[in-house]
Amino acid sequence: MKAVVNEEFGPPEVLKLKEVDKPIPKEKEIQIRIHATSVGFGDLAARNFTYKIFHMPAPLYPPMKFVFGLRKPKKTILGAEFSGIVEDTGRDVTLFKKGDEVFGYVGDKFGCYAEYMCMAQDGSVALKPPNMSHAEAATIPYGGIIAHELLRKMKIQPNQKILINGASGGLGSAAVQLAKHHFGAEVTGVCGTPRIEFVKSLGADKVIDYMLEDFTRSGETYDIIFDILNKSSFGRSKNSLVKNGRYILASFGMRQILTMLRTKLIGSKKLICSMALKEDIVPVKELADAGTLKAIIDKSFPLEQAAEAHKYVEDGHKKGHIVITLDHL
Ligand SMILES: NC(=O)c1ccc[n+]([C@@H]2O[C@H](COP(=O)([O-])OP(=O)(O)OC[C@H]3O[C@@H](n4cnc5c(N)ncnc54)[C@H](OP(=O)(O)O)[C@@H]3O)[C@@H](O)[C@H]2O)c1
């Protein structure tokens, strides 16, 4: 089968189209013929896994570097989310059958930049929302699963004010839609100039351009600030939180964990470093089926142009989701 393989760490050019062995499903696995996948933060990070790109506590870096590869990548076929058709099933598979249209998330196992991929039938895989194309469905799982899990833990009340810093990214764009249309919050999104219209189209009530305005100086206050890349600090953002307000971080280091412990004991405003530990696609499928969670595609690239797709994202052009298509192969 054809796959895009990365045998060394480095720039987008390390992604090369190759012929590799087709995977065979184990007893409880399904084999999926991939029709579309995407370019996400995880793909860029795994392609060139360095400390700079690793947004988590320093003690976790050595084991993660071991997992991703010390000198050469261990994850040689990227792609964390997909949409496709079940082509074959292992002997003990009961949940899916050949011909089912499915979409899902394999996270840091990767492997979707390939014509075929095998995964456990009880993994993060579900029937594709019928109202979505493969290209659209392939952009939903990562952001949807992680944003839903983190927002669910925040226990947002209808009409509460939430600011999402990093609203145009994979996680943030799903968080804006879910906070607005599922949890009923009043949403302010923060992103860079080229992506203002994209974030508005997701349903944000207000969009702030971080290149022109610092939200911490506007005098506006929020019940929740959800900072995805840890770009504004808790200290600087405290005046932008209401009394008992919460500042939630999706990316954090040891310093933020220590601040979280301190704010647990002292003060009404809390810093929370939050991890999505469950990868549950069921609520995401329901929200996509209902039209609450939409895919807004900026550009599609055929598999053989995966390097160009990565470059397009890294050069800052992306205004929505970037899809890699395989249905022409
Ligand atoms: N806690 C968890 O369980 C969990 C799970 C998965 C991922 N993560 C973390 O989530 C992060 C990746 O999120 P993602 O996939 O959404 O990334 P992404 O697609 O690369 O998006 C990054 C976002 O950050 C924005 N941004 C960049 N510079 C900014 C600045 N100076 N001020 C404000 N916003 C800025 C970008 O805006 P523009 O593009 O418009 O400039 C974009 O909206 C990683 O750090 C990863 O470790 C956490």
Image (tube, rainbow, N blue to C red):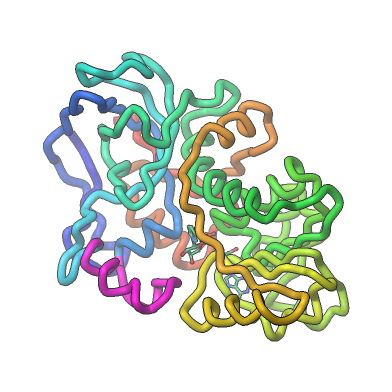
User: Is residue 62 highlighted in magenta?
Assistant: yes
Viewer-nearest residue: 143 or 243: 243
The image position of residue 41, as x and y in percent, is: 44, 59
Instruction: Residue at 16% x, 45% y: name it.
Output: 18
Instruction: Residue at 33% x, 16% y: name it.
Output: 94
Instruction: Residue at 33% x, 56% y: name it.
Output: 307
The image position of residue 135, as x and y in percent, is: 48, 35
Question: Farthest front residue?
Answer: 265
Horizontal side of residue 150 vs 237, given as left or right = left
Whether residue 287 is situated above or below residue 85 in the rendered picture: below
Whether residue 194 is situated above or below residue 220 in the rendered picture: above
Q: Is residue 174 visible?
A: yes
Q: Which quadrant does the N terminus fall into?
A: top left
The image position of residue 113, as x and y in percent, is: 30, 44
Instruction: Residue at 47% x, 38% y: name it.
Output: 138
Q: Which quadrant does the C terminus fall into?
A: top left
Horizontal side of residue 32 vs 182, given as left or right = left
* Image quadrant, ligand 1: bottom right
Q: Which residues are magenta?
A: 48-67
Viewer-nearest residue: 261 or 176: 261
Q: Is residue 213 visible?
A: no
User: Is residue 105 highlighted in magenta?
Assistant: no
Whether residue 130 is situated above or below residue 40 in the rendered picture: above
Horizontal side of residue 178 vs 104, given as left or right = right
Viewer-nearest residue: 179 or 18: 179
How many marks the image carries: the answer is: 0
Horizontal side of residue 155 vs 158, given as left or right = left
The image position of residue 97, as x and y in percent, is: 34, 14
